[in-house]
Amino acid sequence: MNTVSYTEPQVIANAGDFGRVKPWLHPLFMNVDALGTPPLDEMYAVIRLVMVTGATSCAIAAPSGTGKTFAIAKFRGALQRDYGDIPVVLYNALNLHANTIRGFFKNFLYGLGYDSAIGETGDLRQRVTNYLSDAARQSGTSTVILMVDEAQELRELDMQFLKDIFNALHNERVRLVSLLFGEAPKFYNVAASWPECIDARFAQHKCSLRGLNKQEDIVRVLREIDSAPFSIGSDDTWTSTLFPAAYAAGFRLENEAPSFVNALAKATRGKSLALPTANVFAAIKACVHAHWERDAADMVIGDDAWRQAVAWGRIAKAVAALSRGEPRIWQISA
């Protein structure tokens, strides 16, 4: 079996043969957030519990590499699917600090997509409140979901401003459900500094997004790739469109799980409690790309190919960096 160097990417001579989609245009390389993983399932179960029990908020810490960006996209889509009548507003807190109330509400309006934020402080606050209130009332639910990304950048002053919005909506009998996503370990420390009145409103429940830490997790990811539909209404799957000849002969990525897990264990010396999701997907993509032009009924990937893919995904380095961080302290309670 030929080996593939991941430091010298191979030229794909047959790109486009048989109408196949080029790997870099395939959903696996573009829409990974469409896939489910056990950690995402666990976290979304908590979010659904927040929704149905009348809770006000959940603070979610995600160590670097666990897929916070993918998680937010996945959860936003799932919320719109499961609670379609409830509006979901996404706000990114990165680099939107303000030292005044007026500055905060201007930045918040910009974050909501407004091109202009002209007016006095009271007017700006009212515009933010009206925006959220109108969205909730027009849906007929009197509820609005606010998802905040990069929440580790929120200062206590920012949280006081958000509390003003929460109180204004509460007075109008509108329920604001806040889902705060922040990078750990910084988010742990930031949230710990909030006074009780802030914590009760915006971190009523706390949990951490874990990495992939079981063989079952890896099997699930590979199975998702095997079964994910290539397009709406299509019988073709991600794997069948990548390797049509091998797929027709029975090849499935799920069956590669033992080799992949073995390569992961060797790279991390079997000591990893959590594998960064982003790096795991990088390894899968590298292995798939390396074998795309080798599609055949008798295609075999093999242990060495997975070892090289794991090296390309820089999983050992990512795991080491993750283990040096503060241990996970927010346990999922659902």
Image: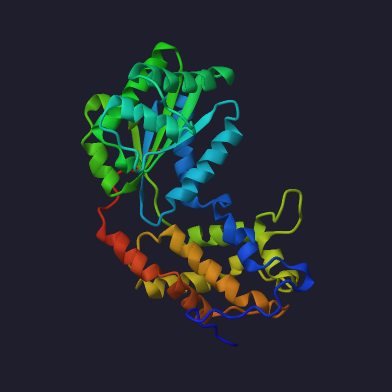
Position of 284 with respect to 155 (left or right) is right
Q: Residue at x 36, y 27 (%)?
A: 105
Examine the rendered structure and indicate whether residue 320 appears above or below residue 224: below
Quadrant containing the N terminus in the rendered view: bottom right
Position of 86 with respect to 197 (left or right) is right
Is residue 199 at least partly visible in the picture?
Answer: no
Q: Residue at x 51, y 41 (%)?
A: 75
Coloring scheme used: rainbow
Quadrant containing the C terminus in the rendered view: top left
Examine the rendered structure and indicate whether residue 99 appears above or below residue 217: above
Q: Residue at x 34, y 37 (%)?
A: 206
The spot of residue 300 in percent (x, y) is: 63, 79
The spot of residue 24 in percent (x, y) is: 61, 65
Position of 269 with respect to 37 (left or right) is left
Q: How many numbered marks does the figure carry? A: 0
Examine the rendered structure and indicate whether residue 310 appears above or below residue 219: below
- The extreme right residue here reads 18
Is residue 297 at least partly visible in the picture?
Answer: yes
Q: Nearer the viewer, residue 298 or 103?
A: 103
Q: Based on the displayed image, in which of its 4 quarters is residue 228 positioned?
A: bottom right
The spot of residue 275 in percent (x, y) is: 40, 61
